[in-house]
Image (tube, helix red, strand yellow):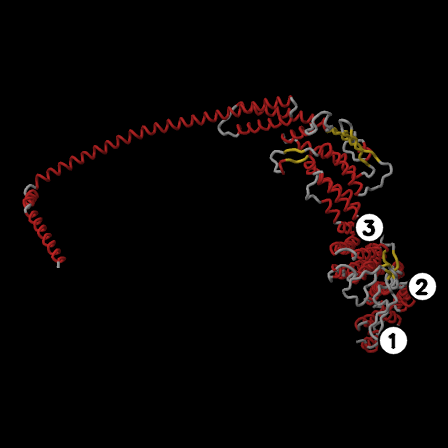
Amino acid sequence: GSLVAAVLAHSGCLDKEHLGARVGRLSRRGEVCTMINNKYSEFLPSMQNAEELVAQVEALANNIDLLKVDIENEVQRDLNVAVAEFTELKQQLERDTLVLSVLKKLQELDTTIKGCNSALLEEQYVTAAQQLEKARSSLRSLESRRGFELKILKALGTELTVQTQNVIYHLGEEWQKLIVWKLPPSKGSSSLEAVVLSELQLHTLPAQGEDTAVPPVAAVLQALAVLGQLHSKLKHFGQLLLQYILKPLISHPALEPVPEEQPDVFILRFRSQELALEESSPMEVFDKIKLVFEVLHKYLLKVPLELPGEDRKEGRVTLAELLGELIWEELSDCLIHNCLVNSIPTNRSKLEQYKEVIESTKEFEKALKKMQFLKEDTTALLKYACNVNSHFANKKCQDVIMAARNLMTSEIHNTVKITPDSRTALPDLPPPGSGDHLKMHRPSSLVHDVTVSLGSESRLSPFTLCLPTCRISSSVQQLVELAYHTLLEATASTDLCCVQPFDCVRNIFQLFYEVVPTYHRENLQKLPQLAAIHHNNCMYISHHLLTLGHQFRFRGSSVLSSEAATFVDMVPGFRRLGIECFLAQMRVQKGEILERLSSARNFSNMDDEENYCAANKAIKQVLHQLRRLGMVWQDVLPVNMYCKAMGALLNTALAEIVTRIAALEDISAKDADRLYSLCRIMVEEGPRVFTPLLEEDKNKKYQEEVQVYVQKWMTFKELMIILQANLQEIVDQWADGKGPLAEEFSAAEVRSLIRALFQNTERRAAALAKIK
């Protein structure tokens, strides 16, 4: 109850106070009236006051703007003056700073030049060289400043050049005192007599009592290095060393180095051994070269140097390393081409002995690396020595190619006789069923008494696939033997070295294919015998090429075992080469036969003695030509080839005669008799040109079989019958187109011959009617 009473009491107080404030505010109603009066009754004066006030404000604003512009102009003018003054002061400071730095550089330049002069007077060459390099650096710095040129710089540059050349001259004098060459009078001569006169003197031994830690030679060399002159000096020294010491020691087995040490000089001389081999072994050469480098290293090349601008380990390098970089490549090439190449064995049995050379090469390079003459990664010499199998194969192939070329350019007419049972030292074929079993066979003679079984009853002759009896050039036989033995050696090689001999053998035959027809072209065209021999040579080579690759297929490395190791692809080319050469000679001989028969005056008017003599002469000339060919091809061509060739030439003559006689339009009885006699000469003498064998009695068989090789032989004999027959006999020979005459002549040709031989009578007309 008390809480409610308090609330009510308080509420009553608030209401009383609120009413009092309201009454007070209402009592101020006079102010409101005043305000309304001013607003509505006195409006015009207030507006005039406000307008005046606005005008005053605008005037004040204009004054303010004018003042602002004046202030800005004044401040900007003062600011520009200040900036210009500051810039000028800054530039003046930069000029003064630049002049001060230039003066300092000029002072340094003058000081270093003076220091160089004083060091040079005291023979302190390293200090003098360093001062020169410092002066040159200062001069370069001055010259590099753009827009700042001093006339004095040119004079200083000239002075610096003079001082540099002066120091280089003194260093050159010292170099010549340290290293003295005594060369033979005839410079450039590489003869043993001239080289023996060469001498090298090294005055690099420190004098007694002098500090041996820094000998004078080190100072001279270091000064040359600082000035950049060491490379040219060392290069010249290296060239003299190669020309008068190292290369002669490699080239002359009798030359021997003789080192000699005296109290203040070391001398390297040479002497010539009286009893020396024609070629030095690599071991001997390596020992001599190593001796030279050992003494040079002891007295000169071990000097350590600091090369400016070189990125080297610890900034130091020995003279030996620098010299090695200059001459090692040329020296190693000389060692390879004048020493190691000659030591490559030509016989595979000596390859094992070459290990000594490889070890010697390793020791040689090891010694040079120890003397720092060689870098660790320099192994060109050793690589060549270790690759002996490849070099052996290369050398062997070169020798084989040279031998083959000599054989190809030798005389073709030096021949040997080849028979089916000829024994040649060639490897055997692998035994049947050998499969992929790789087995080495010793070379032996071919076995000829073995027959190949084709079944229980049939057997081939051992000579079935043999080359027929003929003559070939002895050089070609040697060439094929060379190919066999080259491949035989290849079977004992590694896969890599096996390819080279195989390719070499292919190159041999390819060389034969290209060289022989060109080299012997004139003789092959003019001499029938050589053409026949060349034909046989090509057939002999192609005969061996058929099985050459197969014979070595299971004898060695996998390279030869592959089917790619074959020569069969070359066979058609060689056969074509031989055939084309012989056919060209046949065309020449046929042309000569036809040319001789062309002088027979077409075999017409044989009753004229002059015409008969001309025809008779032509026949005899043809027979003489055939007999001559028969003699030069005798025992050269295979019998079958001989008979075919002679038959083709005789057939050419007979066919020409038949054609000429059959073309005659009028043949008198006397003409017919004389034509018959000419034809009889051909029939009697023609078979006698068939003499393929030396034994005369064995040639009768081939003379009796002349009709086998001469296509027109029976035609020619039928022509002879017609020349001597009467009309009835001719009709009987024709036998209604079924007789022997009909086999050789056509009806038109027979009727033409009848019209030429017989007069126009009823009997002739009747006979002509039956020839149809």
Mark identifier at residue 239: none
Looking at the rendered image, the quarter that the C terminus falls into is: bottom right
Hey, what amino acid is under mark 2? Glu
Looking at the image, do the residues carrying marks 1 and 3 touch, with CB atoms under 8 Å apart? no
Residue at mark 3: 350
Hey, what amino acid is under mark 1? Glu
Q: CA distance from mark 1 to mark 3?
A: 86 Å
Quarter location, residue 95: top left
Hey, what amino acid is under mark 3? Lys
Residue at mark 2: 696
Quarter location, residue 225: top right
- Percent from the top left, x then y, of residue 213? 69, 29
84 versus 426 height, above or below = above
- Percent from the top left, x then y, of residue 163? 61, 24
Label located before the other in sequence (2 or 1): 2
Residue at mark 1: 729
Looking at the rendered image, the quarter that the N terminus falls into is: bottom left
- Percent from the top left, x then y, of residue 120? 64, 23
Which element carries disc 3, helix, strand or loop? helix
Q: CA distance from mark 2 to mark 3?
A: 54 Å
- Percent from the top left, x then y, of residue 297? 73, 35
Mark 2 or 3: the one toward you: 3
